Image: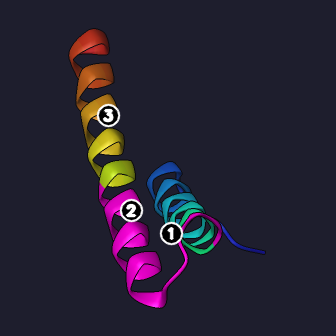
Amino acid sequence: MWNLDHFEVSVLFAILASAVLGLVTKRTDRERIRYGLYCFGCFMAALFCIGWFMKLLHG
């Protein structure tokens, strides 16, 4: 069916989790969009930081 690599699955998870967090935690549409984008940015920053950390550990 689909052949996604680890990075693509991580980005897909970040998008979906950010959308859900934005929808269920805020009241107005503006707050939901801003918080969803903030969460997506945090997920992506964590993804890259953890990726670099693993690269440093394993060489």
Magenta span: chief secondary structure: helix
Q: In this view, does 16 lie above or below 45?
A: below
Toward the front, the furthest residue is 27
Q: Label 1 amino acid?
A: Ile
- Residue labelled with disc 1: 15
* Dot 3 crowding, Cα within 10 Å, few <14, some 14–19, many 20+: few
The first of marks 2 and 3 along the sequence is 2
- Asked whether 5 or 39 is in front, the reply is 39
Toward the top, the furthest residue is 57
Give the CA separation, mark 1 to mark 3.
Answer: 18 Å
- Residue labelled with disc 3: 51
- Asked whether 46 or 58 is in front, the reply is 46
The first of marks 1 and 2 along the sequence is 1
Which numbered disc, 1 or 3, marks the residue closer to the eye?
A: 1
- Asked whether 13 or 39 is in front, the reply is 39
Residue in the picture at 51% in, 53% down: 10
Q: Is mark 1 on a helix, strand or loop?
A: helix
Rendering coords of residue 35 (x, y %): 39, 67
Q: In this view, does 24 lie above or below 52?
A: below
Kindly indicate the quadrant of the structure image that contains residue 36. bottom left
Location of the C terminus by quadrant is: top left
- Residue labelled with disc 2: 40
Q: Range of the magenta residues?
A: 24-41
Q: In this view, does 17 lie to the left or right of 53?
A: right
Q: Is residue 53 left or right of residue 23?
A: left
